[in-house]
Image: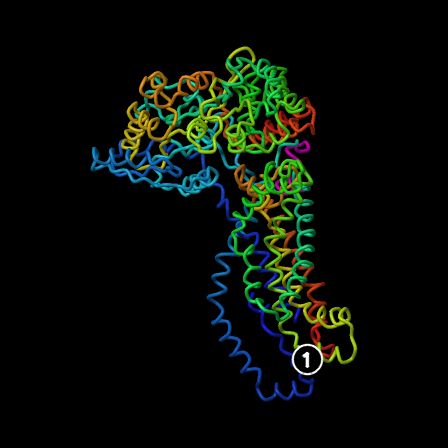
Amino acid sequence: MNTRKYLLPAAVAGVLALSLSACGGGGGGSTASSGGDAAANLDGRGPITYVQGKDNSNVVRPLVDKWNAAHPDQKVTFKEQSDQADQQHDDLVQNFQAKNANYDVVDVDVIWTAEFAAKGWLQPLTDKMSIDTSKMLPATVKTATYNNTLFAAPQTSDGGILFYRKDLVPTPPKTWDEMMNMCSIAKQNNIDCYAGQFAKYEGLTVNAAEAINSAGGTIVGDDGKSTVTSAAAKAGLNNLVTAYKNGNIPTQGVTYQEEQGRQSFEDGKLLFLRNWPYVYNLAKTDGSSKVKDTFGMAPLPGKDGPGASSLGGHNLAVSVYSQHKATAKDFLTFMTSEETEKFYATQGSLAPVLGSLYDDPTLVQQLPYLPVLKTSIQNAVPRPVTPFYPAVTKAIQDNAYAAIKGDKSVDQAMTDMDTAINSASQ
Amino acid sequence: MSTLAQPKKAPETPSPKTKKVQKEVGQDRAATSQGRWAFWLISPALVLLAVVIVYPVVNAIIMAFQKDQGLDPVTKVFVQGGPAGLDNFVHWLAQQCGSAACAPGTLGSQFWSAVGTTFFFTVVTVVLETVLGFWMAVIMARSFRGRSALRAAVLVPWAIPTAVTAKLWFFIFAFDGIANKLFGTAILWTGSEWPARWAIIISDVWKTTPFMALLILAGLQIIPAEVYEAAKVDGASAWQRFTQITLPLVKPALMVAVLFRVLDALRMYDLPAIMTQGSNGTTTLSILVVDQIRQGFNSAAALSTITFLIIFLVAFIFVRFLGANAVASATPKTKGQDK
């Protein structure tokens, strides 16, 4: 009897423990029936909702207000999600599964676009829904294209930049080997030479992909099958492995995310840093920054010219469940117009997707890194556009991390990565 | 849950004789009508439990026998996988991906290491927390000036949300963080296997020891002081008083506290997720489940079902074997014990 007194609560505790993790999925949504949804409501006009992550630099609300003033009968409501990428992703998934018609226009990270498109949740931007992408940088359009169909409108972009110390290195390195040779300068000054993002998280996928693509390799081919066992891909990863082994990437480099590298660079303890453009403002204005006037920016070094940056940024997509797709499409056009892109760049430091804006003198005066970023994005290769992205990025992270730390040979790491990518996409 | 906290009544053990007599008096009818009442009174709670607990669990188990969605080779659109039989369970337990063993870099290849990691964390943290918590409880049980202030202060680590705790220790264990500065070391706390594991254990112990201390303290408070006085008069040493009086009498409360902690530790997610992203052999079962949810719901359902069974088994063993002992030692060893 007494035993039972304990057993029930214990059982309940156990059940509770798991029921919470079990209902995270909410069942697999039905798919493949999207043909009907995608063909419906193409001419629908009326109020719509725009969903995106936290609007940190307050650029979305003014734009929405502007739209609402011009279209009183087709008002846009702005729904703000959290500032955590994973939470934004899961929130979108749950609402798409529930076929929520109130998520009309959604902001998707470039790496989720293929997954959502393959699930049949995104409206193909064809025929009546088509938009003009001719002025956009090609790499950004590639991130929004799945199975040769455009599913989203590129809205903002982002590329890797090499931050370096002008006072120690007068001319930035053009190639990876040149940069490695300059590490002797770092040694003389008793500082670390090169850092990127090598902790085991999405940033490592970005950096490993850059190393592989810059050396002329690829991660997946056009058929979605892995191509990481090629000699060029191995040589690319080997660059990082060798740099870590001989100390050009510091020991603590394998714990660096964006911020740790930035802090080290601003402390004057780092010669070269691969990071996103956001570092520019902080390194220029931070009170603690010791490199305010002594840092420069250059395109990432590659094999024998600019390297191939991975692309960041966000795309705008229309939900197939939206009831006012005509309005949604107009809003998409408005949100990717030159005027909006300019506003994004000046107010939010968000890199535009229109090539012409990178040469706009007023913009360049405000954001001096734009010409460098243009080179970066022009040479950029998107991370694998695949509906199995979560599995693919894990395969890259786990194996690249093991190789860089020296737990595995490059050959072994690439063989495992190859098997893992292919088994993920079956 | 509240049944755990109820003071134990001495079990009533009517002799067989009186039982018979009562039966004849028609106690039966009274009992059944009481039973019916009781059923109606608890039915809202039962319905609520069914909705929030039974339904998700049953749903997860049903999903576990479905294949994950796959791509239609022609349209490149996801289609439902159909029934999977035991495939999802085989995938995890045998670490099979398709027909071959899962390659490093897939979630499937991490199942057994995640089980090992989870149990390692559980055993080490619970043992440390119990010992330290007991020690703290014994100190707090004494009367001295500022005792209530100390009790409040001890609670601070437990009051901080785990996510914040994790970030806090993440910074402490950073390469140029406090820990390395203090000891003059250059350890990659979050970038190498054993340091990462110990970093997580230290954080967990720091956070949860107060919780253990308070539960054990509650158990200590109900031991009457007279018992100790009597033991002192009989000439028992401090050690004897501790082992002969404190331990047996505090055991029921201690067991409940340990059970709670074990169940909690088996579900550990946020500390390793934030401090190491599950790298360097710190992936627990919960981290694996959450990662798998993003890759395919049905495999995740199978994995969480397996995890559920593991945790349930541990809880069952605890209650059946350890808990039963605790109960037996706390009740007078007379008649009326269910075996």
Instruction: Establish if A344 lies above or below A47.
Output: above
- Residue B337 at x, y = what percent? 71, 75
In what element is the residue under mark 1? Answer: helix
Q: Which residues are magenta?
A: B87-102
The residue sitting at 69% across, 52% down in the picture is B123
Task: Please state which of residues B300 and B235 is positioned toward the viewer in this rendering.
Answer: B235
Residue B245 in the magenta stretch? The answer is no
- Relative to B54, say whether B34 is above or below: below
Snapshot quadrant of residue B248: bottom right
**Of all residues shown, which one is farthest toward the top?**
A304
User: Residue A346's image quarter?
Assistant: top left
Q: Chain of mark 1?
A: B
Taking the spot 57% from the left edge, 52% from the top edge, the residue there is A18
Residue B237: image location, x then y, percent: 78, 72
Q: Is residue A45 visible?
A: yes
Please state which of residues B35 and A333 is positioned toward the viewer in this rendering.
Answer: A333
Q: Amino acid at mark 1?
A: Glu
Bin the neighbour count of mark 1 within 10 Å (Cα to Cα): few under 14, some 14-19, many 20 and up: few
What sort of colour scheme is used for the picture?
rainbow
Which sits in the foreground, B211 or A39?
A: B211
Q: Is residue A23 left or right of residue A52?
A: right
| Residue beneath disc 1 | B226
Number of numbered discs on residues: 1
Q: Is residue B99 magenta?
A: yes
Q: Residue at x 49, y 75 (%)?
A: B37
